[in-house]
Amino acid sequence: MAAPLAGNRKGRGRYRPMAEINVTPMVDVMLVLLIIFMVAAPLMTVGVPVDLPKTQASALNQE
C-alpha cells in the first residue's frame, strides 16, 4: 500500500510506502488456527478399533 505525498492532491505524483504494517489480520488468523487445533487435538486421540490376530508361537526365552 502506498500513500500520495502531501503536496500532490491529484494523485498523479510519486507514492511513498506506508511505514507501518497492519498485524490485526495476522492475529485474527492465528487465533482461529489456535481454536481449530484446540478443538481438533482431543479428537485425534480417539483411535480406530483394530482386531489383531491371535498368535500361536510360544514366548521367546530372554537370557
Image (cartoon, rainbow, N blue to C red):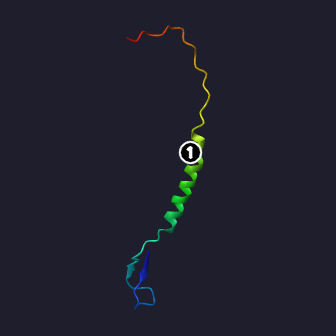
Residue 54, horizontal then vertical, whole percent: 57, 14
Residue 31, horizontal then vertical, whole percent: 54, 59
Q: What residue sits right under mark 1 in the picture? A: 41
Q: Please name the amino acid that badge 1 sits on.
A: Ala
Instruction: Pick whichever, 54 or 62, lies toward us.
Output: 62
Q: Is residue 51 above or below residue 37?
A: above
Label tally: 1
Residue 35, horizontal then vertical, whole percent: 57, 54
Quarter of the image holding residue 45? top right
Q: Is residue 47 above or below residue 43?
A: above
Instruction: Pick whichever, 17 or 9, lies toward us.
Output: 17
32 sits to left or right of 4 = right
Q: Residue at 54%, 12% (x, y): give it.
A: 55
Tell me the quarter of the image containing the C terminus: top left
Q: Residue at 41%, 75% (x, y): give it.
A: 20
Q: Residue at 50%, 7% (x, y): give it.
A: 58
